[in-house]
Amino acid sequence: MPQQSGVRSQPASAPGALEVVQDFCNSLHVERGTDALADPVTAPGRLRDIGLPAEDGMRDEELAELVRLRTALRDLVHTGSDAGARVRAVECVAEVAAGLRYALRADGAGRLGFEPVGSPAERIAGMMLSRVHDAQRDGTWERLKICRSDACAWVFYDHSRNHSAVWCAMGVCGNRQKVSRYRGKR
């Protein structure tokens, strides 16, 4: 689809259930300076919009834990994160995972699956970590990346054959980077 001048094209979405993780990570919009999880009144609606079981009236502490998990997931996705940020991200994910509870449920066809239980924030965290686990197992997790442009920092899914994409949208962030580099040389 052609891009209109000044309009950001949406990068390709991650496949399947990983798309919800991508959307959760992108609830922080660095370029606009907005955080969809910052306001307890509007955050549940935003979480429901991306397919998560949020309920109105979530407490500030619950949202703070979700923001902490989101930060950790973004740091794990960001290949350029410093070693300290990655260690803290792993510790956070391990701590969140240790506090989660799951119930074994059967669907209408008799297939068993684990479903996170607890408060809305605990269920959301459980869903996120279950989906990350599945993506790590099927090899799609490594294709979730953060745009190299610090001004953007959008989480995107790398659909390139050789897994080498570094910008969410070549026509926007890639172009900006190339123009900036060219001007720097002159």
Image (tube, rainbow, N blue to C red):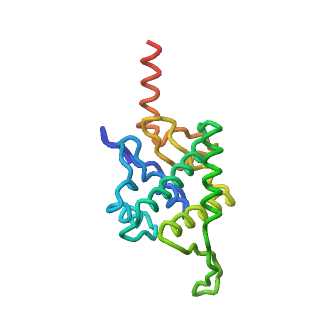
Residue 170 placement (x, y as % from top left): 46, 38
Residue at image position (49%, 66%) is 121
Residue at image position (40%, 71%) is 55
Residue furthest right as drawn: 137
Residue 113 placement (x, y as % from top left): 63, 77
Asked whether 116 or 144 is in front, the reply is: 116
Residue at image position (38%, 50%) is 35
Asked whether 1 or 163 is in front, the reply is: 163
Vertical position of residue 61 compared to residue 175: above or below: below
Asked whether 30 or 88 is in front, the reply is: 88
Residue 88 placement (x, y as % from top left): 62, 46
Residue furthest top as drawn: 186
Tell me: 8 left or right of 81.
left
On-image quarter of the C terminus: top left
The part of the image, by quadrant, that contains residue 165 is top right
Residue 65 placement (x, y as % from top left): 50, 58
Tell me: 74 left or right of 40.
right
The part of the image, by quadrant, that contains residue 166 is top right
Residue at image position (49%, 58%) is 66
Vertical position of residue 72 compared to residue 125: above or below: above
